[in-house]
Amino acid sequence: QVQLVESGGGLVTAGGSLRLSCTASGRTFSSYAMGWFRQAPGKEREFVAGISVSGGTRTYGDSVKGRFAISRDSAKNTVYLQLNSLKPEDTAVYYCAGQGTYYFNSAAAVDSWGQGTQVTVSS
């Protein structure tokens, strides 16, 4: 298990951009596939993006394809989520997640969760 802390959320206007960061502490995360989920009030948790241990395989939820990008820096034990062309419907708490596998699979396989960072997009 890896301890995860997110940062970088905030308030932006529609069409703007943000970059979220998730840093692992206490353990190395070089053996962890990483991903991001989000949850808006009254809605179900939604998969946003996932990245393999090497960074070579990246997957995205349908609602964010072409707008968001996930990356990782193993030297800094950090995974990033670049959010571009933001829409009001992107407003949610974004959660970093990790699992001890090579590829990121699903929420059921996650064994480490961050505390969440709020992203609010105004119209």
Image (tube, rainbow, N blue to C red):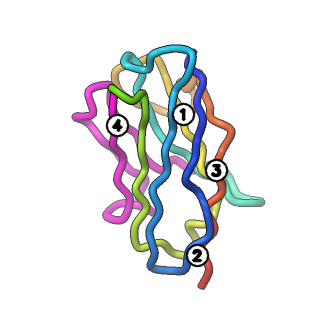
Q: Earlier in the sequence, mark 3 or mark 1?
A: 1
On the image, which quarter does residue 50 sit in? Answer: top left
The amino acid pointed to by label 1 is Ala
Is the C-beta separation of discs 3 and 4 under 8 Å? no
Q: Quadrant of the C terminus?
A: bottom right
On the image, which quarter does residue 32 sit in? Answer: top left
| Of labels 3 and 1, the one closer to you | 3
The amino acid pointed to by label 3 is Thr
Q: Which residue is mark 2?
A: 88
Image location (x, y in percent) of residue 57 = 26, 36
Give the residues in magenta: 45-74
Q: Which residue is mark 3?
A: 117
Q: Residue at x 56, y 33 (%)?
A: 107
* Distance (Cα) linking label 3 and label 1: 12 Å
Q: Which residue is mark 1?
A: 97
Q: Earlier in the sequence, mark 2 or mark 3?
A: 2
In the displayed structure image, the side of residue 58 where residue 112 appears, left or right: right
